[in-house]
């Protein structure tokens, strides 16, 4: 990949792998369905690293914040002192994908990384869980088959936020710079395109 002479190679390594091509993607593993994300990342050729403490964030090429329960995840982030390191990771330009509770964690009321306000369990009363085919801006190959489990939606967002997809006119997939957030569970339907999109976003080290 790199035509750089050895002297121009950064002192830090952005990947655990020796080939210099494989991306190392962290999956926040405090709670929720982090294993399904790790499996999907491996399927598309990335190395997946479970993140439980701040030191696990070192040298990551990207990060996934999975679905789960945002209240429990918030407590875990507090307990492990992960809030500030996660904000710094986002500020450094590392691509991030937040799914369902992961989208909530990134919003104004939690980590404050995304300029969005979410409503938790927004589809709740009507249906606790449902599946829908959602057309996503910039994602080729047809709609994503999306699994929603007590899902949030975006109620309000700032000008830097691009809405990629909606259900009943409520934004359920957004992008702000290098950060993607979806209200559903892309790791459950076997469609790898969102994880591939995450890997294709150039981080600060690319
Ligand atoms: N309802 C959960 C919450 O509020 C999110 C559900 C999910 O991640 N599937 O955190």
Image (spheres, rainbow, N blue to C red):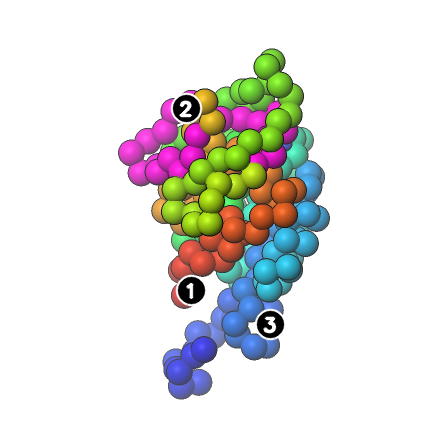
Part of the protein shown in magenta: 146-166
Which image quadrant is residue 130 in? top right
Residue 33 higher or lower than 205, as above or below: above
Q: Is mark 1 within 8 Å of ligand 1?
A: no
Residue 165 higher or lower than 206, as above or below: above
What's the residue at 42%, 56% (across, down)?
Answer: 201
> Does residue 79 appear in the picture of this structure?
no
Q: For the N terminus, which image quadrant?
A: bottom left
User: Label 2's element?
Assistant: loop
Residue at the farthest left position? 159
Front residue of this view, candidates 74 and 97: 97
Q: Would you say 106 lies left or right of 38 here? A: left
Residue 13 higher or lower than 151, as above or below: below
Where is residue 44? Give x, y as percent: 59, 60
Q: Which residue is mark 1?
A: 205
Q: CA distance from mark 2 to mark 3?
A: 42 Å
Q: CA distance from mark 1 to mark 2?
A: 36 Å
Front residue of this view, candidates 51 and 186: 186
Circles 2 and 3 in contact, beta carbons < 8 Å? no
- Residue 58 lies in the magenta-colored region: no
Where is residue 159? Give x, y as percent: 29, 34
Lower sequence index among marks 2 and 3: 3
Lower sequence index among marks 1 and 2: 2
Kindly identify which numbered label has been placed on residue 17.
Answer: 3
User: Label 1's element?
Assistant: loop
What's the residue at 38%, 35% (across, down)?
Answer: 163
Q: Would you say 12 lies left or right of 71 here? A: left
Front residue of this view, candidates 1 and 114: 1
Q: Would you say 24 lies left or right of 140 here? A: right
Kindly identify which numbered label has been placed on residue 169.
Answer: 2
Circles 1 and 2 in contact, beta carbons < 8 Å? no
Where is residue 188? Give x, y as percent: 65, 42
């Amino acid at each position: 990949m790199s035509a750089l002479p050895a002297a121009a190679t950064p002192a830090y390594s952005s990947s655990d792998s020796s080939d210099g091509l494989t991306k190392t993607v962290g999956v926040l593993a405090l709670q929720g369905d982090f294993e399904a994300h790790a499996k999907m990342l491996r399927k598309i050729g990335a190395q997946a690293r479970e993140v439980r403490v701040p030191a696990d964030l070192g040298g990551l090429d990207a990060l996934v914040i999975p679905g789960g329960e945002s209240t429990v995840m918030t407590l875990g982030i507090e307990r492990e002192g992960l809030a500030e390191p996660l904000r710094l990771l986002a500020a450094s330009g590392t691509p991030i994908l937040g799914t369902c509770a992961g989208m909530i964690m990134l919003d104004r009321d939690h980590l404050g990384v995304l300029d969005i306000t979410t409503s938790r369990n927004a589809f709740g009363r009507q249906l606790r869980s449902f599946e829908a085919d959602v057309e996503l801006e910039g994602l080729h190959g047809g709609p994503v088959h999306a699994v929603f489990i007590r899902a949030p939606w975006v109620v309000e967002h700032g000008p830097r936020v691009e809405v990629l997809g909606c259900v009943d006119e409520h934004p359920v997939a957004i992008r702000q710079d290098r950060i993607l957030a979806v209200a559903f569970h892309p790791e459950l339907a076997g469609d790898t395109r969102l994880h591939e999109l995450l890997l294709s976003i150039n981080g600060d080290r690319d």
